[in-house]
Amino acid sequence: VAPYQTTATFQDLERFLAESGCCICRVAAQAERRYFDGLLYEEVVTPATAEAMRASGGYCARHVGVLLGRRDPLATALLYGYVLSARRAELDRVRRGPRALWPGRAGSRPAAHRCPACRVEQEAVDRAAQVLALGLEDGSLAGPWRRSEGLCWPHFLGTRTRCRAAGREVLDAVEADRLARLAAEVEALVQSFDYRHEGERPAEVATAWRRLVATMAGRDGGGPWEPRP
Ligand SMILES: [Zn+2]
Ligand SMILES: [Zn+2]
């Protein structure tokens, strides 16, 4: 048994490969949930959290939605209070001197300026992609991968760059097969809107539009998609 096979990430992947949708989206969702659980439970008033909120200016649109969805008025007030105090200090500075405000262009930002929840998610995603690549290379995850529903496109790309030739072959073969099945289901869905169409849509056809977006856009498209009924 290779050391990486004893990690929690390996066990998560084994479990999530057996569930519907992209297994790395599930790893990311789990990391996000744990991040907000830990944060709201006891980390709101730590210096590290205050610094992360000040440096980043707060969360991306998706994670603002997650935070507001937790409906925690006190924690939210404290977290964004850090951002507010940083903004006020910034405004004070530029009013006193000739310095400009940070223009905030996403591409030029150092890591500390990125959404704190996205950073946590990305670390978990990178670990999972690395472990999946290793597991395909030595075969330990090849079986679960062949029985899985494949990866969303962003996580497929992230895993593929970490694979060597043997792993890439099985990665590509399964992904191509799953994308072909999705294309057929999407085609059937579109056909079913033809006025000559009769009868009910099978569940995998009726839900194809959701899985199409989740597969192409990954987490930004609501991945992992809903389980097949
Ligand atoms: Zn994914
Ligand atoms: Zn984010």
Image (spheres, rainbow, N blue to C red):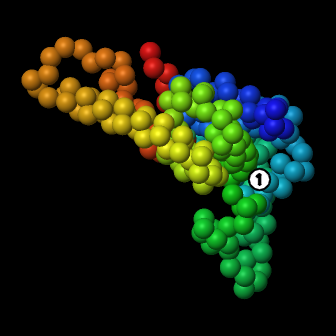
Residue at image coords 11%, 26%: 195
Does residue 109 lie above or below 20 as drawn?
A: below
Residue at image coords 89%, 45%: 46
Local secondary structure at mark 1: helix
Q: Residue furthest left?
A: 196
Q: Position of residue 106 (x, y in %)?
A: 60, 65
Q: Would you name the residue on which mark 1 appears?
A: 53
Q: Observer-nearest residue: 98 or 27?
A: 27
Q: Position of residue 182 (x, y in %)?
A: 37, 33
Quadrant in which the N terminus appears: top right
Q: How many marks?
A: 1
Location of residue 156 by image quarter: top right
Q: Observer-nearest residue: 129 or 169?
A: 169
Residue at image coords 71%, 50%: 119
Q: Label 1 is placed on what type of residue?
A: Met
Q: Observer-nearest residue: 191 or 41?
A: 191
Does residue 130 lie above or below 106 as drawn?
A: above
Residue at image coords 49%, 25%: 226
Q: Position of residue 196 (x, y in %)?
A: 9, 23
